[in-house]
Amino acid sequence: MKRTAINRVVHLELHTGDLPGAGAFYAELCGWRPERIDTPHGIDGGIVEGQVKRPLWLPYVEVADVGAVTDHARILGATVLLEPREGPAGWRSVVATRAGGEIAFWESKSRSAPE
């Protein structure tokens, strides 16, 4: 049996069309307040406002090669919602399946730097 690496969730975003409403709801319900935190070994998260049909939670999974994982997801039948894209801290992509929902892949620039 072939062993595969276990990829961990490193970030969780709530995508919503109502940022103030979602922020107020979670502030009252969970006591969450906006703040910047550094979590090198834990999970962080945020709320992102945009045009979405319904609010959804989007987990980001850390991978070694965002392009290869995105291609593999496509081969497995996923729809690529966001092709691999570079940002200041790394690369990300987003895929979706009817059965599995949406998931984002994250490749950190610091992870790919030579040691």
Image (cartoon, rainbow, N blue to C red):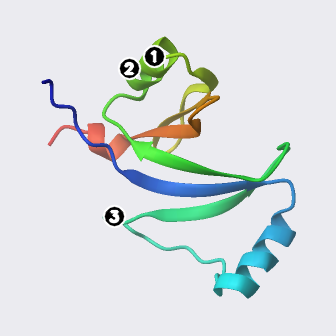
Q: Quadrant of residue 6?
A: top left
Q: Which mark is residue 2?
A: none
Q: Which residue is drawn at 42% across and 29% down?
A: 66
**For mark 1, what is the residue?**
71
In which quadrant of the rendered image does the C terminus lie?
top left
**For mark 3, what is the residue?**
40
**Disc 2 to disc 1: CB gap under 8 Å:** yes
Q: Tell me the distance, in whole angstroms, between the alpha carbons under discs 2 and 3.
A: 24 Å
Residue 89 in view in this figure: no
Q: Residue 45: x and y, percent?
A: 55, 63
Residue 10 in view in this figure: yes
Q: Residue 110: x and y, percent?
A: 32, 46
Q: Tell me the distance, in whole angstroms, between the alpha carbons under discs 2 and 1.
A: 5 Å
In which quadrant of the rendered image does the N terminus lie?
top left
Q: Which amino acid does label 2 sit on?
A: Ala
SS state under label 3: loop
Q: Which amino acid does label 1 sit on?
A: Asp
Q: Residue 74: x and y, percent?
A: 51, 16
Q: Residue at x 86, y 71 (%)?
A: 21
Q: What residue type is labelled 3?
A: Pro
Q: Which tag, 1 or 3, sits closer to the chain's start?
A: 3
**Disc 1 to disc 3: CB gap under 8 Å:** no
Residue 100 in the figure: left or right of residue 51: left
**For mark 2, what is the residue?**
68
Task: Please tell me which residue lies in front, 32 or 98.
Answer: 98
Question: Mark 3: few, some, or many residues within 10 Å (few <14, many ≥20)?
Answer: few
Q: Residue 22: x and y, percent?
A: 79, 69
Q: In which quarter of the image is residue 107?
A: top left
Examine the rendered structure and indicate whether residue 55 appears above or below residue 24: above
Q: Residue at x 35, y 28 (%)?
A: 65
Question: Mark 1: few, some, or many residues within 10 Å (few <14, many ≥20)?
Answer: some
Give the farthest residue toward the top.
75
